[in-house]
Image (cartoon, rainbow, N blue to C red):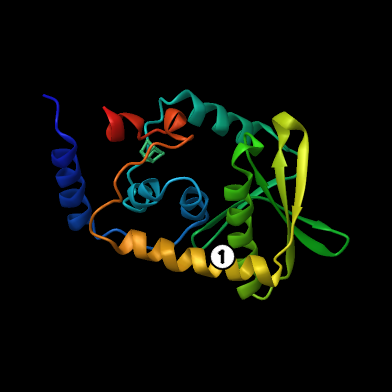
């Protein structure tokens, strides 16, 4: 039986009310904030997008296979960092992405990691890595970037604290999104 979008949202609400989901901001939520606010809400409820979406699979393969030599995924609190290495006495945090199409999102996600690491007393610089394009972009936490991140975090918190998700809005990520059927079927 096909459920209407309203019925599907009711199911989500029932599910999340019972499980008391954590509302912590993560790097992934920062990434999605610059693409789709609705996806931020859905991800914050731990509703994993469809893993059958081929773009998710390609992204995972690139992330797993690239930079194996440097790879040292670390988890600190709710941070999952792709690459952590020391370069000339400085800590370097690397974030691997499938393409630079959503560079702004990737830059802000990395800024989020740099900011959290800074709060832990470690000064680091960041590198965005796009192995398919053989591209590497340096990111450092400037005061402007910190300010922009702070503003984004306030807005993300507002989205994830909301009882209802934002309405779906067509955007250039929809065709690749694991929630596509959920939003538009
Ligand atoms: S399908 Fe589009 S509107 Fe729906 S969550 Fe994904 S990106 Fe957002």
Task: Tell me what residue is drawn at x 42 percent, y 64 percent.
Answer: 155
Q: Residue furthest front?
A: 170
Q: Position of residue 82 (x, y in %)?
A: 63, 48
Task: Tell me what residue is drawn at x 63 percent, y 31 percent.
Answer: 62
Q: Residue furthest right?
A: 88
Seen from the viewer's position, the closer of residues 70 and 134 is 134
Look at mark 1 in the image and give the residue it sits on: 149
Q: Eyeballing the image, is 6 above or below 159?
A: above
Task: Tell me what residue is drawn at x 52 percent, y 55 percent.
Answer: 27
Q: Position of residue 87 (x, y in %)?
A: 84, 57
> Is residue 165 toward the left or the right of residue 32 in the image?
left
Q: Position of residue 54 (x, y in %)?
A: 48, 23
The N terminus, quarter of image: top left
Q: Dot 1 lies on which element?
A: helix
Q: Position of residue 145 (x, y in %)?
A: 65, 65
Q: Residues within 10 Å of mark 1 (few under 14, many from 20)?
A: some
């Amino acid at each position: 039986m096909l459920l209407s979008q309203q019925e599907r949202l009711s199911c989500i609400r029932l599910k999340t009310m019972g499980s008391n989901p954590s509302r912590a901001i993560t790097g992934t939520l920062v990434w999605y904030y610059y693409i789709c606010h609705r996806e931020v809400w859905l991800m914050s409820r731990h509703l994993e997008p469809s893993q059958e979406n081929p773009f998710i699979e390609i992204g995972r393969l690139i992330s797993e296979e690239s930079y194996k030599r440097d790879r040292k995924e670390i988890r600190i609190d709710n941070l999952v960092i792709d690459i952590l290495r020391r370069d000339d006495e400085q800590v370097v945090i690397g974030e691997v992405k499938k393409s630079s199409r959503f560079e702004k999102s990737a830059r802000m996600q990395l800024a989020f990691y740099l900011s959290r690491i800074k709060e832990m007393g470690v000064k680091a610089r960041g590198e965005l890595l796009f192995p398919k394009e053989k591209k590497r972009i340096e990111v450092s936490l400037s005061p402007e970037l910190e300010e922009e991140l702070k503003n984004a975090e306030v807005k993300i918190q507002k989205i994830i604290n909301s009882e209802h998700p934002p309405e779906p809005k067509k955007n250039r990520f929809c065709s690749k999104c694991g929630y596509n059927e959920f939003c538009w079927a």
